[in-house]
Amino acid sequence: MNRYVLALLFVAAAAAANTNVPPAPHTGSFSLSGATIHTVSGATIEDGLLVVEDGRIVSVGNANGEEADVDLGGLHVYPGLISANTVLGLVEIQAVRATVDVQEPGPINPNARAEVAVNPDSENIPVTRANGVLAALTAPLSGGSLIAGRSAVIQLDGWTREDMTLRAPVGMHMSLPGLRVPDGMEEPQRRRFIDQRDEQLELLRTSFEDALAYRKAKAAGEIDEIDRRWDAMIPVFDRELPIFAHVDELMQIRYALRLAEEFGFRLVIVGGADAWRIAELLAEREIPVIVSAVHLPPQRRWEGYSTPSENPIRLFEAGVKVAIANPGGTFTAPHERNLPYEAAEAVAWGLDPDEALRMITLYAAQILGIDDRLGSIEPGKDATFIVTDGNPLEIRTEVLRAFVQGREIDLSSRHTTLNEKYGERLRQLEAGE
């Protein structure tokens, strides 16, 4: 087959919309009772009663024999899980370039906005929410970009990207080149590495200086023409918008801290494989960490194999605000449904299960600035929650129902369709048809 025709077929397959139909906005009221309600922010309520009106939670408490519209006897209610480091909606098939829209060309793109590129029909979205993840931070990919642009929190249901966007912008995303010279480099290669590293760091620092100078000039009325790149940086220097620094190495984290101190912006560490090494300093400066991810090999050959898994508990015990996320990047977009198992890995190495759950619900919402809407089951918050037959951190637990702002969403996906298809094949074989 002609390779151009084959490429077009790949693109056509990738562009096909998922068949899930978003429900209409919720109006009126309904109540659920009989389930164990895990509020996350407060006490767990046995035989709870949850009342929803016009997409918001209006009351949570004990049923005390009161009848409800739906009896969930024996089941559990949890807030929807939040994935705090994704490219959901920006990537469909990693190998098909036409379906990957994660970054703009060039190293400095603060004006880029993730939400405008979100594809509401992505097959990855229903696959992700089927396992309880109902909201996600989708961000421009920082790899290759020093300043990649601005992220958005999307809820995983809606007809359009406008329907799905819960908050935008959330943060400005920055990455740093590798600062530690790899062991064993010969001199010419070592010198080239250092020169390229220093050149990128100088470009990053110059960009901050230019953006800060632009802000001052605009405030003084000296700007004749708007520069969209530097205009997008003004909320960063006004401390309205944090910078999410995608850094893992200790040297990178320290450099990001120096930049934040020098230029006066708020900082969130993303990745943070070495963050446990300076946990006390991060706690002192009140810098949150989105640990991304937990189920990874250690950074160095001599480190214990459980080092990444123990990262969240070491940070938490030092007083750092922690969220747990998947690794991010184009290759993880189809696997965001595994978020609860990243948290479960940390539990296996000593983290309290309730704290692990908060790291993918309430703490994630607090770091992303959406805790007034999501992250726990409380009156006044969005009625975005899941109904399960057990703890979502357990791989055997099934998500039975899910609600986004009070509307019950379809939990079918490409995975469930294929399961039904090949289940039918087995049935036919067993029946001899």
Image: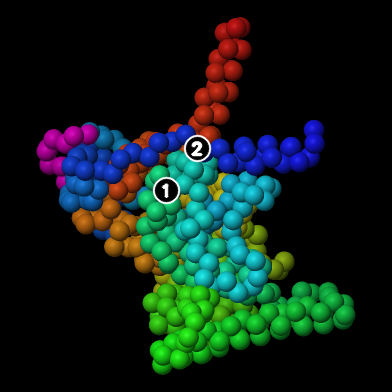
Q: Residue at x 18, y 42 (%)?
A: 28
Q: Mark 2 packing: few (<14 Cα in 10 Å), some, or many (20+)? A: some
Q: Residue at x 41, y 93 (%)?
A: 220
Is residue 411 at all visible to an observer of this figure?
yes
* Left or right: residue 19 compared with residue 421: left
Q: Mark 1 packing: few (<14 Cα in 10 Å), some, or many (20+)? A: few
Q: Which residue is mark 1?
A: 160
Q: Residue furthest front?
A: 224
> In the rendered image of this protein, does residue 220 appear above or below residue 173?
below
Looking at this view, is 217 or 179 the one in front? 217
Q: Which mark is residue 130?
A: none
* Position of residue 313 measured from the top left corner of the image (x, y, whole percent): 48, 65
In which quadrant is the C terminus drawn? top right
* Magenta segment, prevailing SS (helix, strand or loop): loop
Q: Are marks 2 and 1 in contact (CB under 8 Å)?
A: no
Amino acid type of the residue tagged 2 in the rendering: Asn
> In the rendered image of this protein, does residue 84 appear above or below residue 214?
above
* Position of residue 332 measured from the top left corner of the image (x, y, whole percent): 59, 52
> In the rendered image of this protein, does residue 273 appear above or below residue 124?
below
Looking at this view, is 264 or 12 the one in front? 12
* Position of residue 106 measured from the top left corner of the image (x, y, whole percent): 65, 70
Extent of the magenta region: 62-70
Q: Residue at x 25, y 48 (%)?
A: 55
Q: Disc 2 and disc 1: Cα gap in Å? A: 13 Å
Which is more foreground, mark 2 or mark 1?
Answer: 1
Q: Residue furthest top?
A: 432
* Position of residue 137 measured from the top left corner of the image (x, y, whole percent): 46, 59
Mark 2 or mark 1: which comes first in sequence?
2
Q: Secondary structure at mark 1?
A: loop
Is residue 274 at all visible to an observer of this figure?
no
- Magenta stretch: residue 279 in it? no
Q: Which residue is mark 2?
A: 18
